[in-house]
Amino acid sequence: KQEVTQIPAALSVPEGENLVLNCSFTDSAIYNLQWFRQDPGKGLTSLLLIQSSQREQTSGRLNASLDKSSGRSTLYIAASQPGDSATYLCAVTGETSGSRLTFGEGTQLTVNP
Amino acid sequence: DAGVIQSPRHEVTEMGQEVTLRCKPISGHNSLFWYRQTMMRGLELLIYFNNNVPIDDSGMPEDRFSAKMPNASFSTLKIQPSEPRDSAVYFCASSIQGAHRTQYFGPGTRLTVL
């Protein structure tokens, strides 16, 4: 059974700092990995999707990397802003699990002005 | 597009009552997903449909839960009878069919069973 772990569970940083969120998964037979953002009381918003054949994806100040063989992904946020404060979740789709997403517990990020 | 629409946004009910949650996917999307989020268990997939057909319902906790998708623009998740441990936020998501496609989430329904 696939298990996804995110470290740290919570992170508080001053505005402007660069930061890294970590995600690990136990079964490397994945089809893709996604990073989502969840604001309090709201649904999830997809940030980046990395196919298993890719090493990284970038969108603005966000960069996600994937090392499938070691079961790891990182989300790098450059020049953090208070508006980046949210919970960040990673999720994987297994090669044989169709469209089923398995989520990590999330990292709660607070960027202080 | 209005995005995925869920109703109600909040539901408070008493144990034993029937609860029906509703979802309207994004127009043109042919995959629909129901998730449950709790502090203890995080975000879990309950069931998903492709072209209105249930594909994977292995996450449905027990027979008290049922989901239907009578057409491409509407789905329901029903709990009968409800129990306090069903209290959670229930999300609906939709996508174009395919494991490589991004899923778009609705705002969720916060269910409280007293």
Image: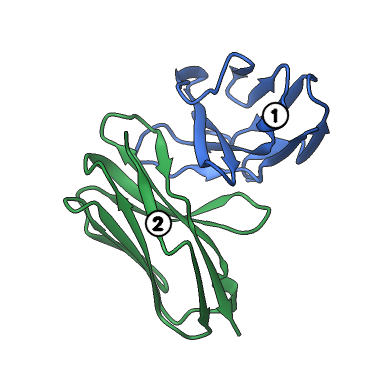
Residue underneath mark 1: B22
Q: How many residues crowd mark 2 within 10 Å: few (<14), some (14–19), many (20+)? A: many
Q: Is residue A103 left or right of residue B11?
A: left
Nearest the eye: A56 or A20:
A20
Tell me where residue A27 sits by quadrant.
top left
From the rendered image, report the letter of the chain displayed in green.
Answer: A
Q: Are marks 1 and 2 in contact (CB under 8 Å)?
A: no
- Could you tell me which secondary element the residue under label 1 belongs to? strand
The image shows residue A100 at horizontal and vertical percentages of 40, 33
Q: Is residue A28 left or right of residue B107?
A: left
Image: A57 above or below B71: below
- Could you tell me which secondary element the residue under label 2 belongs to? strand
Which colour is chain B painted?
Answer: blue
| Amino acid type, residue under disc 1 in the picture | Arg
Q: Name the residue furthest left.
A: A69
Q: How many residues crowd mark 1 within 10 Å: few (<14), some (14–19), many (20+)? A: some
Image: A104 above or below B91: below
The image shows residue B12 at horizontal and vertical percentages of 82, 35
CA–CA distance in space, label 1 to label 2: 31 Å
Q: Which mark is residue A15?
A: none
Residue at (52% x, 41% y) in the render: B41
Image quarter in which the N terminus of chain A is found: top left
Image quarter in which the C terminus of chain A is found: bottom right
Q: Chain of mark 1?
A: B
Residue at (69% x, 21% y) in the render: B79
Colouring mode (rainbow / by chain / secondary structure / one colour) = by chain
Q: Is residue A56 left or right of residue B50?
A: left
Q: Chain of mark 2?
A: A
Residue underneath mark 2: A6
| Amino acid type, residue under disc 2 in the picture | Gln
Residue at (27% x, 44% y) in the render: A26
